[in-house]
Amino acid sequence: MIAVAIELIARSPAPGRNGGWFIIVQTLAQSLAAAVIALAIAPAWGSTGSFVFLTGVTLAGLLIAPRLLDDYGPLSADAALRPHAMLALRPALALLSIFTLYMFTGSIWAFLEPLGAQNDVPSATVGLIVSVSLLAQVAGAVAATALEPKIPFVGMLTLSALVAVGIGAAFTREVSLPFFWLLSLSSGFLLLFVTPWQIAMTVAADGTRRTALLTPAAQLFGGALGPAGASFFVTGSDYRPIAVFAGASALVSLALTLSFGFARSGRKGF
């Protein structure tokens, strides 16, 4: 289902900006559904009522789905001429850059509670931070949608990776509660903020726009493998190596983004 939406976005005239609107609507819809279930459905009808509500919301989507084909843009002419374009160097660099940056976010969020405990942050406060971070994610999506047409993707993704490296480095040290809040919410902000530029990068990497379809897969795969990889570095009760792993992942993403920029400005055959 996500691939269908991303395909539509990739074929549109402004895939980066439309990608920003996509994540805004997606995040707000998830937040609204969660709030309705928690405040109204679950207290009255329990889990059964919650699943019935979700079923109704899903069926409502069928009213919109038939309209998708009316707006489905034409496939790029490059798609027929270059069927294996997504196997080239630049698409690989773009996807690996996305993958490693989401390894950073996955590592930080999966181990946020033990990282908080090492900084004397109560678990209840960490839970509140996770809830508030949803607002930071929406803010990131809104800001990205407004800024994406004005800022080149290589520059913004480079800056975002540098910020992620800084967040990882800061988490390796003892921080105050306000600074812990700032670092955590900044990570949440980046989570959705980078998506429009990542879509724009995959479109630039592959004229067939097939690589853009793999953007969600690279994000989810990185978000899933980040915690798994980071867990190998945990020794006893010391969770700071998690932050080192996260920062290193962001550093690799930075190197891959810069490599993509050099490859793009270099030989056309790349």
Image (spheres, grey):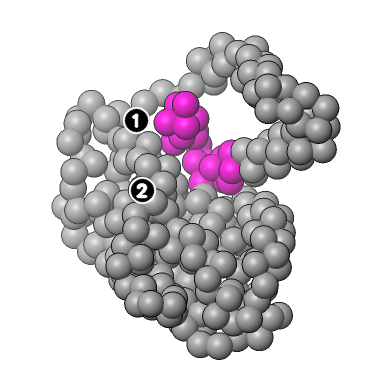
Q: Nearer the viewer, residue 80 or 1?
A: 1
Badge 2 marks a residue whose secondary structure is: helix
Relative to 19, is 122 on the left or the right?
right
Pointer 2 residue: 221
Residue pictured at 49% horizontal, 60% vertical: 110
| Residue type, mark 2 in image | Phe
Magenta residues, as a range? 1-23
Residue shown at the point (50%, 51%) measured from the top left: 195
Q: Nearer the viewer, mark 1 or mark 2?
A: 2
Distance from the alpha carbon under mark 1 to that under mark 2: 27 Å
Q: Main secondary structure of the magenta part?
A: helix
Q: Position of residue 35 (x, y in %)?
A: 76, 40
Residue at (18% x, 48% y) in the render: 88
Q: Is residue 16 magenta?
A: yes
Amino acid type indicated by mark 1: Ser
Q: Does 41 appear above or below 52?
A: below
Say if mark 1 contacts mark 2, CB within 8 Å: no
Q: Residue furthest front?
A: 236
The residue under the point 49% across, 41% down is 15
Q: Is residue 95 above or below residue 229?
A: above
Classify 213 as above or below 168: above
Residue denoted by label 1: 76
**Left or right position of 187 against 234:** right
